Amino acid sequence: MFPRIVINKEKYRHNVNTIQSLASQHGLSTMAVTKSFCASKPLIDVLKEERVDYIADSRIKNLNKFSTNIPKVLLRLVSLYDVDKAVNSVDISLNSEIKVIRALNEAAKKYKRQHGIILMLDIGDLREGVYYKQELYDIISEILSMDNIVLKGLGTNLTCYGGIIPREKTLKKLIDIVYAVEKDFSINIELVSGGNSSHLHLLNKDIHIDRINNLRIGEAMVMGRETAFGEQIEGLYDDVFTLEVDIIEYRKKPSIPDGDVGMDAFGKKPHFEDLGVINRAILAVGQQDVDFRELKPMDNNIRLMGSSSDHIIAAIMQYPEQYKVGDVLKFKLTYGSLLALMTSEYVEKYYVETI
Ligand SMILES: Cc1ncc(COP(=O)(O)O)c(C=O)c1O
Protein backbone atom coordinates (compact mmCIF):
# COMPACT_ATOMS: atom_id res chain seq x y z
CA MET A 1 0.00 0.00 0.00
CA PHE A 2 2.62 2.54 1.13
CA PRO A 3 5.01 3.90 0.08
CA ARG A 4 3.29 4.60 -3.16
CA ILE A 5 3.82 6.91 -6.06
CA VAL A 6 0.52 8.39 -7.16
CA ILE A 7 0.46 8.88 -10.93
CA ASN A 8 -2.17 11.11 -12.46
CA LYS A 9 -2.77 9.95 -16.02
CA GLU A 10 -4.91 12.94 -16.92
CA LYS A 11 -2.32 15.46 -15.74
CA TYR A 12 0.26 13.62 -17.81
CA ARG A 13 -2.09 13.68 -20.82
CA HIS A 14 -2.54 17.43 -20.36
CA ASN A 15 1.23 18.05 -20.22
CA VAL A 16 1.86 15.85 -23.26
CA ASN A 17 -0.83 17.55 -25.32
CA THR A 18 0.23 21.06 -24.32
CA ILE A 19 3.85 20.41 -25.31
CA GLN A 20 2.90 18.60 -28.50
CA SER A 21 0.77 21.52 -29.64
CA LEU A 22 3.41 24.10 -28.66
CA ALA A 23 5.98 22.13 -30.67
CA SER A 24 3.72 21.64 -33.67
CA GLN A 25 2.89 25.37 -33.76
CA HIS A 26 6.64 25.80 -34.39
CA GLY A 27 6.73 23.05 -37.03
CA LEU A 28 8.36 20.52 -34.71
CA SER A 29 7.51 16.86 -34.22
CA THR A 30 7.89 15.42 -30.72
CA MET A 31 9.49 12.31 -29.31
CA ALA A 32 7.89 11.58 -25.93
CA VAL A 33 10.61 10.22 -23.63
CA THR A 34 9.41 7.47 -21.30
CA LYS A 35 12.46 6.44 -19.30
CA SER A 36 11.54 8.36 -16.13
CA PHE A 37 8.50 6.14 -15.65
CA CYS A 38 10.15 2.97 -17.02
CA ALA A 39 7.68 3.01 -19.95
CA SER A 40 4.89 1.85 -17.65
CA LYS A 41 1.80 0.68 -19.51
CA PRO A 42 -0.85 3.17 -18.30
CA LEU A 43 1.26 6.15 -19.42
CA ILE A 44 2.31 4.45 -22.65
CA ASP A 45 -1.43 4.03 -23.28
CA VAL A 46 -1.83 7.80 -22.90
CA LEU A 47 0.88 8.38 -25.52
CA LYS A 48 -0.79 5.91 -27.87
CA GLU A 49 -4.21 7.51 -27.34
CA GLU A 50 -2.79 10.97 -27.98
CA ARG A 51 -0.94 9.72 -31.08
CA VAL A 52 2.43 11.26 -30.22
CA ASP A 53 4.81 11.38 -33.17
CA TYR A 54 7.47 9.08 -31.64
CA ILE A 55 8.02 7.20 -28.36
CA ALA A 56 11.62 7.34 -27.15
CA ASP A 57 13.54 5.73 -24.31
CA SER A 58 17.16 5.19 -23.41
CA ARG A 59 16.63 1.52 -22.50
CA ILE A 60 15.77 -1.23 -24.99
CA LYS A 61 14.11 -3.16 -22.16
CA ASN A 62 11.57 -0.34 -21.69
CA LEU A 63 10.87 -0.08 -25.42
CA ASN A 64 10.22 -3.83 -25.57
CA LYS A 65 7.49 -3.60 -22.95
CA PHE A 66 4.86 -2.45 -25.42
CA SER A 67 3.87 -2.75 -29.04
CA THR A 68 2.65 0.14 -31.16
CA ASN A 69 2.72 1.44 -34.69
CA ILE A 70 4.12 4.75 -33.40
CA PRO A 71 7.84 4.74 -34.30
CA LYS A 72 10.09 3.72 -31.39
CA VAL A 73 13.39 5.53 -30.83
CA LEU A 74 16.36 4.37 -28.78
CA LEU A 75 17.92 7.46 -27.20
CA ARG A 76 21.10 6.15 -25.64
CA LEU A 77 23.84 5.39 -28.15
CA VAL A 78 23.59 1.74 -29.11
CA SER A 79 26.00 -0.60 -27.38
CA LEU A 80 28.05 -2.81 -29.68
CA TYR A 81 26.63 -5.77 -27.75
CA ASP A 82 23.00 -4.74 -28.35
CA VAL A 83 22.89 -4.29 -32.12
CA ASP A 84 20.69 -7.35 -32.73
CA LYS A 85 18.26 -6.27 -30.04
CA ALA A 86 18.27 -2.69 -31.33
CA VAL A 87 17.37 -3.54 -34.92
CA ASN A 88 14.63 -5.88 -33.75
CA SER A 89 13.20 -3.54 -31.11
CA VAL A 90 13.24 0.00 -32.49
CA ASP A 91 12.74 1.89 -35.73
CA ILE A 92 15.37 4.54 -35.08
CA SER A 93 18.42 4.74 -32.83
CA LEU A 94 20.77 7.59 -31.95
CA ASN A 95 24.38 6.89 -32.91
CA SER A 96 27.80 8.46 -33.15
CA GLU A 97 30.27 5.57 -33.60
CA ILE A 98 30.91 4.16 -37.08
CA LYS A 99 31.96 0.81 -35.59
CA VAL A 100 28.49 0.44 -34.05
CA ILE A 101 26.71 1.68 -37.19
CA ARG A 102 28.57 -0.94 -39.23
CA ALA A 103 27.44 -3.61 -36.75
CA LEU A 104 23.86 -2.29 -36.92
CA ASN A 105 24.03 -2.55 -40.70
CA GLU A 106 25.17 -6.19 -40.46
CA ALA A 107 22.46 -7.01 -37.91
CA ALA A 108 19.80 -5.30 -40.01
CA LYS A 109 20.99 -7.27 -43.04
CA LYS A 110 20.78 -10.52 -41.04
CA TYR A 111 17.17 -9.81 -40.04
CA LYS A 112 16.27 -8.34 -43.46
CA ARG A 113 15.39 -4.97 -41.98
CA GLN A 114 16.04 -1.31 -42.61
CA HIS A 115 17.24 0.50 -39.48
CA GLY A 116 16.98 4.27 -39.15
CA ILE A 117 19.63 6.27 -37.37
CA ILE A 118 19.94 9.82 -36.15
CA LEU A 119 23.61 10.74 -36.24
CA MET A 120 24.46 12.79 -33.17
CA LEU A 121 26.62 15.91 -33.38
CA ASP A 122 28.29 17.48 -30.37
CA ILE A 123 27.91 21.25 -30.61
CA GLY A 124 29.41 22.01 -27.23
CA ASP A 125 27.77 20.10 -24.38
CA LEU A 126 30.44 17.39 -24.59
CA ARG A 127 28.33 14.33 -24.12
CA GLU A 128 27.65 12.18 -27.18
CA GLY A 129 28.20 13.21 -30.76
CA VAL A 130 30.72 13.69 -33.55
CA TYR A 131 32.72 16.85 -32.90
CA TYR A 132 34.84 17.51 -35.98
CA LYS A 133 33.52 18.06 -39.50
CA GLN A 134 35.98 15.76 -41.30
CA GLU A 135 35.00 12.80 -39.13
CA LEU A 136 31.34 13.64 -39.68
CA TYR A 137 31.81 13.65 -43.43
CA ASP A 138 33.70 10.32 -43.34
CA ILE A 139 30.92 8.73 -41.30
CA ILE A 140 28.13 10.08 -43.51
CA SER A 141 29.90 8.90 -46.68
CA GLU A 142 30.13 5.40 -45.27
CA ILE A 143 26.52 5.38 -43.99
CA LEU A 144 25.26 6.42 -47.41
CA SER A 145 26.96 3.36 -48.89
CA MET A 146 25.23 0.97 -46.45
CA ASP A 147 22.30 -1.12 -47.68
CA ASN A 148 20.40 -1.55 -44.42
CA ILE A 149 20.95 1.74 -42.59
CA VAL A 150 18.84 4.79 -43.36
CA LEU A 151 20.25 8.14 -42.30
CA LYS A 152 17.00 9.54 -40.89
CA GLY A 153 18.47 12.65 -39.42
CA LEU A 154 21.06 14.65 -37.56
CA GLY A 155 20.63 15.52 -33.92
CA THR A 156 22.23 17.13 -30.93
CA ASN A 157 21.80 17.04 -27.19
CA LEU A 158 22.39 19.99 -24.85
CA THR A 159 22.13 20.82 -21.15
CA CYS A 160 23.11 17.34 -20.05
CA TYR A 161 26.82 17.00 -19.34
CA GLY A 162 28.14 20.50 -20.02
CA GLY A 163 24.98 22.37 -19.00
CA ILE A 164 25.02 24.31 -22.27
CA ILE A 165 21.86 26.37 -22.78
CA PRO A 166 20.25 26.14 -26.22
CA ARG A 167 20.69 29.61 -27.72
CA GLU A 168 20.43 30.71 -31.32
CA LYS A 169 24.21 31.09 -31.65
CA THR A 170 24.86 27.55 -30.38
CA LEU A 171 22.13 25.93 -32.45
CA LYS A 172 23.35 27.78 -35.54
CA LYS A 173 26.34 25.39 -35.47
CA LEU A 174 23.92 22.49 -35.98
CA ILE A 175 21.97 24.28 -38.68
CA ASP A 176 25.11 25.26 -40.60
CA ILE A 177 26.22 21.62 -40.57
CA VAL A 178 22.80 20.42 -41.76
CA TYR A 179 22.88 22.82 -44.73
CA ALA A 180 26.47 21.92 -45.56
CA VAL A 181 25.77 18.17 -45.43
CA GLU A 182 22.67 18.53 -47.59
CA LYS A 183 24.61 20.52 -50.17
CA ASP A 184 27.81 18.48 -50.17
CA PHE A 185 26.11 15.07 -50.27
CA SER A 186 23.08 16.17 -52.33
CA ILE A 187 20.72 14.64 -49.78
CA ASN A 188 17.76 15.83 -47.75
CA ILE A 189 18.05 15.50 -43.97
CA GLU A 190 14.53 14.53 -42.92
CA LEU A 191 14.85 14.92 -39.14
CA VAL A 192 16.84 17.65 -37.42
CA SER A 193 16.42 16.68 -33.78
CA GLY A 194 17.40 19.84 -31.93
CA GLY A 195 17.25 18.90 -28.29
CA ASN A 196 15.33 18.12 -25.15
CA SER A 197 13.28 19.96 -22.50
CA SER A 198 15.96 22.65 -22.31
CA HIS A 199 14.90 23.78 -25.82
CA LEU A 200 11.41 24.78 -24.70
CA HIS A 201 12.43 28.19 -23.36
CA LEU A 202 13.04 29.19 -26.99
CA LEU A 203 9.56 28.12 -28.07
CA ASN A 204 8.02 29.96 -25.13
CA LYS A 205 9.78 33.12 -26.37
CA ASP A 206 8.48 32.33 -29.85
CA ILE A 207 12.00 31.78 -31.16
CA HIS A 208 12.00 29.23 -33.93
CA ILE A 209 15.32 27.92 -35.16
CA ASP A 210 15.06 27.34 -38.87
CA ARG A 211 15.56 23.68 -39.95
CA ILE A 212 15.15 22.19 -36.47
CA ASN A 213 12.02 20.07 -36.82
CA ASN A 214 12.07 17.65 -33.89
CA LEU A 215 12.49 17.66 -30.11
CA ARG A 216 12.91 14.76 -27.67
CA ILE A 217 10.96 15.67 -24.54
CA GLY A 218 11.00 13.87 -21.20
CA GLU A 219 11.20 16.07 -18.13
CA ALA A 220 8.81 18.80 -19.31
CA MET A 221 6.07 16.23 -19.86
CA VAL A 222 6.47 14.53 -16.50
CA MET A 223 7.46 17.47 -14.28
CA GLY A 224 6.04 20.46 -16.18
CA ARG A 225 9.49 22.06 -16.13
CA GLU A 226 11.87 23.34 -18.78
CA THR A 227 15.46 22.42 -18.06
CA ALA A 228 17.56 25.31 -19.36
CA PHE A 229 16.74 27.41 -16.28
CA GLY A 230 14.63 24.98 -14.25
CA GLU A 231 11.49 27.14 -14.56
CA GLN A 232 8.01 25.75 -14.22
CA ILE A 233 6.16 26.00 -17.55
CA GLU A 234 2.95 27.97 -17.24
CA GLY A 235 -0.16 25.83 -17.61
CA LEU A 236 1.63 22.50 -16.98
CA TYR A 237 1.25 20.28 -13.93
CA ASP A 238 4.24 19.78 -11.61
CA ASP A 239 2.42 17.03 -9.71
CA VAL A 240 1.74 14.34 -12.29
CA PHE A 241 3.66 12.13 -9.82
CA THR A 242 3.57 12.48 -6.03
CA LEU A 243 4.93 10.24 -3.28
CA GLU A 244 2.87 9.11 -0.29
CA VAL A 245 4.64 7.55 2.71
CA ASP A 246 3.34 6.50 6.11
CA ILE A 247 4.76 7.28 9.53
CA ILE A 248 5.95 4.10 11.28
CA GLU A 249 7.35 5.73 14.44
CA TYR A 250 6.53 9.12 15.98
CA ARG A 251 8.46 10.32 19.03
CA LYS A 252 10.04 13.28 20.70
CA LYS A 253 13.83 12.82 20.78
CA PRO A 254 16.96 14.97 20.91
CA SER A 255 18.28 16.05 17.51
CA ILE A 256 21.88 15.14 18.44
CA PRO A 257 22.77 11.44 18.89
CA ASP A 258 23.99 10.39 22.33
CA GLY A 259 27.44 8.69 22.41
CA ASP A 260 30.63 8.61 20.34
CA VAL A 261 29.78 9.24 16.69
CA GLY A 262 31.36 6.76 14.25
CA MET A 263 29.82 6.00 10.84
CA ASP A 264 26.27 6.04 9.55
CA ALA A 265 24.64 3.20 7.58
CA PHE A 266 26.60 4.24 4.47
CA GLY A 267 30.05 4.44 6.05
CA LYS A 268 30.04 8.26 6.26
CA LYS A 269 30.58 10.34 9.37
CA PRO A 270 27.25 12.09 10.02
CA HIS A 271 26.84 15.72 11.13
CA PHE A 272 23.86 17.03 13.06
CA GLU A 273 22.32 20.42 13.62
CA ASP A 274 21.25 20.97 17.22
CA LEU A 275 17.54 21.78 17.09
CA GLY A 276 16.98 20.69 20.70
CA VAL A 277 14.36 18.07 21.39
CA ILE A 278 12.24 17.58 18.28
CA ASN A 279 9.19 15.62 17.16
CA ARG A 280 10.52 12.98 14.81
CA ALA A 281 8.63 10.84 12.38
CA ILE A 282 10.22 7.77 10.82
CA LEU A 283 8.92 7.19 7.30
CA ALA A 284 8.77 3.78 5.64
CA VAL A 285 10.91 4.59 2.63
CA GLY A 286 14.69 4.84 2.42
CA GLN A 287 17.84 5.35 0.43
CA GLN A 288 17.24 2.07 -1.42
CA ASP A 289 14.19 3.75 -2.98
CA VAL A 290 15.08 7.43 -3.17
CA ASP A 291 17.52 10.14 -2.05
CA PHE A 292 15.62 12.04 0.66
CA ARG A 293 17.19 15.35 -0.49
CA GLU A 294 15.20 15.00 -3.72
CA LEU A 295 11.81 14.95 -1.98
CA LYS A 296 9.77 18.12 -1.46
CA PRO A 297 7.29 17.86 1.45
CA MET A 298 3.90 19.30 0.50
CA ASP A 299 3.46 20.30 4.14
CA ASN A 300 6.09 22.96 4.85
CA ASN A 301 5.92 22.06 8.51
CA ILE A 302 8.03 19.01 7.69
CA ARG A 303 11.79 18.96 7.35
CA LEU A 304 13.63 15.87 6.18
CA MET A 305 16.73 15.26 8.33
CA GLY A 306 18.37 12.14 6.92
CA SER A 307 17.90 8.57 5.92
CA SER A 308 19.13 5.00 6.17
CA SER A 309 18.49 2.24 3.61
CA ASP A 310 14.87 1.71 4.63
CA HIS A 311 13.92 4.85 6.60
CA ILE A 312 13.72 8.61 6.25
CA ILE A 313 13.78 10.72 9.41
CA ALA A 314 11.49 13.76 9.31
CA ALA A 315 11.25 16.54 11.85
CA ILE A 316 7.80 17.94 12.51
CA MET A 317 8.60 21.57 13.17
CA GLN A 318 5.21 22.81 14.52
CA TYR A 319 1.81 21.46 15.61
CA PRO A 320 3.15 18.02 16.63
CA GLU A 321 -0.30 16.95 17.80
CA GLN A 322 -1.49 16.97 14.18
CA TYR A 323 0.51 13.80 13.38
CA LYS A 324 0.41 10.18 14.54
CA VAL A 325 1.70 6.75 13.52
CA GLY A 326 -0.11 5.62 10.36
CA ASP A 327 -0.53 9.14 8.97
CA VAL A 328 0.53 9.55 5.35
CA LEU A 329 2.88 12.36 4.29
CA LYS A 330 2.89 13.63 0.71
CA PHE A 331 5.80 14.84 -1.37
CA LYS A 332 6.36 16.45 -4.72
CA LEU A 333 9.28 15.05 -6.69
CA THR A 334 12.31 16.11 -8.66
CA TYR A 335 13.23 14.36 -11.89
CA GLY A 336 15.91 12.40 -9.99
CA SER A 337 13.51 11.18 -7.31
CA LEU A 338 10.93 10.27 -9.95
CA LEU A 339 13.49 8.08 -11.76
CA ALA A 340 14.52 6.35 -8.55
CA LEU A 341 11.01 5.78 -7.18
CA MET A 342 9.63 4.45 -10.46
CA THR A 343 12.56 2.07 -10.65
CA SER A 344 12.11 0.78 -7.08
CA GLU A 345 10.01 -2.36 -6.97
CA TYR A 346 9.28 -1.61 -3.31
CA VAL A 347 7.23 1.47 -4.18
CA GLU A 348 3.66 0.82 -5.31
CA LYS A 349 2.58 2.55 -8.52
CA TYR A 350 -0.95 3.86 -8.05
CA TYR A 351 -2.69 5.37 -11.09
CA VAL A 352 -5.53 7.88 -10.84
CA GLU A 353 -7.71 8.86 -13.76
CA THR A 354 -9.15 12.22 -12.72
CA ILE A 355 -7.45 15.59 -12.30
C1 LIG B 1 19.52 11.92 -26.05
C2 LIG B 1 18.42 12.39 -25.17
N1 LIG B 1 17.47 13.18 -25.70
C3 LIG B 1 16.45 13.65 -24.97
C4 LIG B 1 16.32 13.33 -23.63
C5 LIG B 1 15.19 13.91 -22.84
O1 LIG B 1 15.64 14.95 -22.03
P1 LIG B 1 14.64 15.80 -21.11
O2 LIG B 1 14.11 14.86 -20.09
O3 LIG B 1 15.48 16.89 -20.54
O4 LIG B 1 13.57 16.32 -22.00
C6 LIG B 1 17.31 12.52 -23.03
C7 LIG B 1 17.23 12.13 -21.61
O5 LIG B 1 16.29 11.53 -21.17
C8 LIG B 1 18.37 12.04 -23.82
O6 LIG B 1 19.33 11.27 -23.30
Image: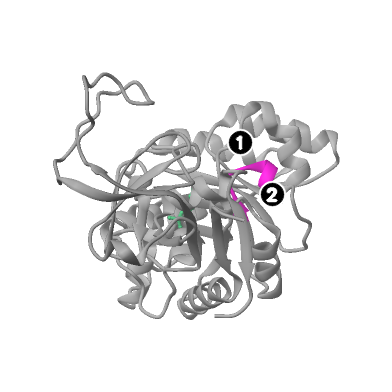
Seen from the viewer's position, the closer of residues 124 and 314 is: 314
Q: Residue 85, percent across and down?
A: 74, 37
Image quarter (top left, top right, bottom left or bottom right) of the C terminus: bottom right
Give the secondary structure at mark 1: loop
Q: Residue 253, percent across and down?
A: 26, 43
Give the secondary structure at mark 2: helix
From which residue to which does the magenta span run? Answer: 56-62
> Residue at 19% of width from left, 46% of height from top?
277
Q: Residue 183, percent across and down?
A: 49, 54
Provide the residue designation for mark 1: 78
| Colour setting | one colour
Residue 63 is labelled as 2
> Residue at 63% of width from left, 66% of height from top?
351
Seen from the viewer's position, the closer of residues 183 and 205 is: 205
> Residue at 34% of width from left, 75% of height from top?
204
- The answer to whether any part of residue 341 appears in the image is yes
**Disc nearer the start of the sequence (2/1):** 2
Q: CA–CA distance between discs 2 and 1? A: 13 Å
The amino acid type of the residue labelled 1 equals Val
* Magenta stretch encompasses residue 58: yes
Image mark count: 2
The amino acid type of the residue labelled 2 equals Leu
Above or below: residue 7 compared with residue 13: above
